[in-house]
Image (tube, grey):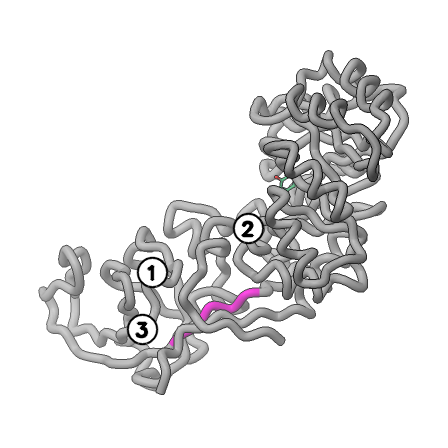
Amino acid sequence: MSRPAQATFDLAALRANYAHAKAVHGGRAAATLKANAYGHGAVQCARALAGVADAFAVAFAQEALELREAGIREQPILVLEGAFDIGDVELARQHGLWLVVHQEEQLRMLESLRGGTAVHAWLKIDTGMHRAGIAPDQTRPFWQRLADCEQVASTTLMTHLASADEPDNLATERQLAVFEAATHGLPGPRSVANSAGVLCWKGAHQDWARPGIMLYGADPRGTPSDVLQPVMQLTSEVFAERWIPAGEALGYGGSFVADRPTRVGLVAMGYADGYPRTAHTGTPVAVGGCASRIIGRVAMDMLTVDLTDLPEAGPGSQVELWGRQVSVNDVAAAAGTIAYELLCNVKRVGRVYW
Ligand SMILES: *Cc1c(COP(=O)(O)O)cnc(C)c1O
């Protein structure tokens, strides 16, 4: 028998989540496939969405090139970090990529172009996140310089929200107001909403949405969703079991000490597979369809679960680390991180698509 650690991907769920994002937001939506589609396989996800997505979005040009080389040719691909060098601009011209422009250097690259195919630019305005983006009062001069570029075909105005996953956080209202003021009267399409903007902020609904995490079935607020469907199911099996007496410690560091005779199941899944080492005792897991918990430390190749109250479970029982029974958001909360990080870290396991 081969090692049972496996990630299973439900591409119909991906399509349903995309349709939901579009229905909530209105307008068009660029499906965000950066970081190998948050660990789900960018090429497979792009193929699954090829008939429905208006565009795709990735972080940098090389990620877009991988999609093009895999035969994803119909949709424009937005490059969210824009060009790192003039080579990226040439890739964009060859392969129909849309380039974010968030700083002067990137604008100068576009101004230096002579002849050839024109590119579509997305001008990114820093409305309060203070990471990438031009200052709001630079919007008009930048917009004008893009309009004057012989090799720029169109300019979309965009910004990115820092705290949209907190529905009561007024910082988002301020960002929306700054965006409105900075872009007032300028022609062209606009784009504000990431997943949290789609789900929580009507004022962020513009011409284009850029949903990411919600496509994979996780609500960016970390709360359960009755609409979004998990795309990835991370599973393995119990491959051994043992009893430890009360008072005995389990695993590295002896961090778990049994307070009663405890039946321990060994599961073929560890931090080398992307399961977080910081998931402490109590992190939810499902064994044979029943709720249980991680006990002791997660090791590189295996972890241990509590089978004491699950007499039916034992070697061969299926274990869901996350998926439809165990929410990846709940595992992330227990591990002190977010679903995004868990999903894009999955590696070494078998991968099955349906
Ligand atoms: C990653 C990213 C998104 C998608 O964000 P989610 O929170 O996953 O929906 C949208 N816009 C930009 C600029 C991004 O970097």
Does 282 sit above or below residue 302?
above
Secondary element at tag 2 = helix
- Spatial CA span between label 1 and label 3: 13 Å
Mark sitting on residue 35 = 2
Mark 1 burial class by Cα count in 10 Å: few <14, some 14-19, many 20+: some
Front one among 272 and 95: 95
CA distance for labels 2 and 1: 18 Å
How far from the left and from the top, in percent, is residue 284?
39, 62
Query: Residue at the spot x=86%, y=20% of the render?
Result: 148
* Cβ–Cβ under 8 Å for marks 1 and 3: no
When the figure is inspected, residue 65 is found, relative to residue 323, above or below; the finding is above
Image vertical order of residue 77 relative to residue 205, above or below: below
Please state which of residues 83 and 335 is positioned toward the viewer in this rendering: 83
Instruction: Classify mark 1: helix, strand or loop.
Output: helix
Image quadrant, ligand 1: top right
Res 167 visible: no
Mark 1 lies on residue: 272
**SS assignment at label 3:** strand
- The residue under label 3 is 267
Labels 2 and 1: the sequence-earlier one: 2
Let me know if residue 77 appears in the view. yes
Q: Is residue 23 magenta?
A: no
Which residue corresponds to the image point at 57% horizontal and 62% vertical from the top-left? 41
Answer with the quarter of the image where residue 115 lies.
top right
Q: Amino acid at mark 2?
A: Ala
Q: Which residues are magenta?
A: 232-236
Q: Is residue 146 left or right of residue 86?
A: right
Q: Nearer the viewer, mark 1 or mark 3?
A: 1
Amino acid tagged 3: Val
- Give, as a three-letter code, the residue at label 1: Ala
